[in-house]
Image (tube, helix red, strand yellow):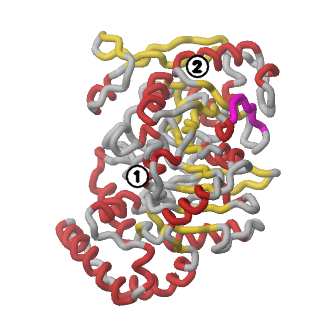
Amino acid sequence: MKNVAVIGSQWGDEGKGKIVDWLSNKADIIIRFQGGHNAGHTLVIDGTTYKLRLLPSGIVRKNKISIIGNGVVIDPWALLEEIKEIKSKGVEVTPKNLIISETANLILPFHKEMDEMREDLAKKEKIGTTRRGIGPAYEDKVGRRGIRLMDLASEKNLENRLANALSHHNLIRKGMGKQIFQNDNLKKDLLKVAPEILKYAQPVWKIIDEYRSKEKKILFEGAQGVLLDVDHGTYPYVTSSNTVASSAATGSGCGPNSINYILGITKAYTTRVGEGPFPTELKDQIGEHLGNIGKEFGTVTSRKRRCGWLDGVLVRQSIRISGINGIALTKLDVLDELDNIKMCIAYDLNGNKIDYLPSTLEDQLKIKPIYKTFEGWKTSTQGIKDFKNLPINAQKYLKEVEKFIGVKISSISTSPERNDTILIEDPFNF
């Protein structure tokens, strides 16, 4: 019996949704353990597209348990809207197949407003957030003034918690020349949706322990990517949570020994949304080509993604930081029409060759990529399900990637469809 954690090895948008959905066929429980509704996972199943933001990707499969862990921050209205949307496509969502940690923190309207105000005031120093209140909600969590799901069960407790949070937020709002936030209507709105949300609430740590004792297979589903980790990413252009594999344990309520295999989802090229360093970014026709063929627009925001060559240095760094055992390579077919394909194998920093991303923002913006060039295959790989049937040049490229990053490519995705996947190593049977 194996439990698998799936994380992104780049800046998110690597195609985790499809891979998690594909792996969830063998899992019993699928757990989201960090992030919020700023993270979008797109699934294409039998021609139907599902765009998920908070719900774990396993929700679209029958007879699976989906869990939203304590490490996730939840906008209750966004969650209810997502449940309504997924139900309209014939997916069953009940307290039997969806469980939410009673200690998960909530994203409230004043968090979203704070996010917007800060970004607007930042001007040239914008982080590039999705303006959904994720960061301010995490700030309140660590500041011990957050509102948790369990707080909705008591009107008196909710009123006290809101007063505590707003005593902080209103001081900042006043200093920014904004109106103070009144909590009366918010309290009423929260109490109105409370029954709809609380029916899913349970002590998730206890549920996980029970499932583990029954030797159920658990799939931990991460959001964003390692390079957006608040500690290990391109700070300050990062998300507000820890996206590395170890946070799967913290964000769901189990020990690190609960995770047996860490799968890093890796796009065959590199993309990034929003601001921040991007050493291999292509601001030319090839970058446009990658974006158009790969349909590189955000699931949640519809923002156009920046595109560039595969940065092997960053992927290798993510692998080492997060203890990744193998990678699932996605969107190989997007490279099909290119004459030549490049992979970054080192950086030039002020004339010196380095093999890692420096920690200072100034140096991250200075570095120049050093590439290794591969001959393209100029033929379609879409829908191929056997490695031996890939074009020879594609096989050569993949073997070089594998050799450079130092771990095995366990699977290769050749289209957005669930079954268009080459399986080389099954994480659940590793």
In the displayed image of the protein, which residue is found farthest to the front? 213
Please identify the quadrant where the C terminus is shown: top right
What residue appears at the point 53 percent right and 42 percent down from the top-left corner?
A: 7
Instruction: Say which element carries label 2.
Output: helix
For residue 45, above or below residue 376: below
Amino acid under disc 1: Thr
Q: Residue 401 got which mark? A: 2
How many other residues sit within 10 Å of disc 2, few (<14), some (14-19) or many (≥20)? many
Foreground of the two, 1 or 72: 1
In this picture, residue 290 sits left or right of residue 351: right
Report if residue 193 lies within the magenta region: no
Quadrant location of residue 88? bottom right
What residue appears at the point 49 percent right and 25 percent down from the top-left corner?
A: 311
In this picture, residue 317 sits left or right of residue 262: left
Instruction: Say which element carries label 1.
Output: loop
Q: Report the residue marked by disc 1.
A: 129
What residue appears at the point 63 percent right and 48 percent down from the top-left corner?
A: 17
Q: Residue 98 got which mark? A: none
Tell which tag, 2 or 1, sits nearer the viewer: 2
Of callouts 2 and 1, the N-terminal one: 1
How many other residues sit within 10 Å of disc 1, few (<14), some (14-19) or many (≥20)? many
What residue appears at the point 62 percent right and 44 percent down from the top-left corner?
A: 2
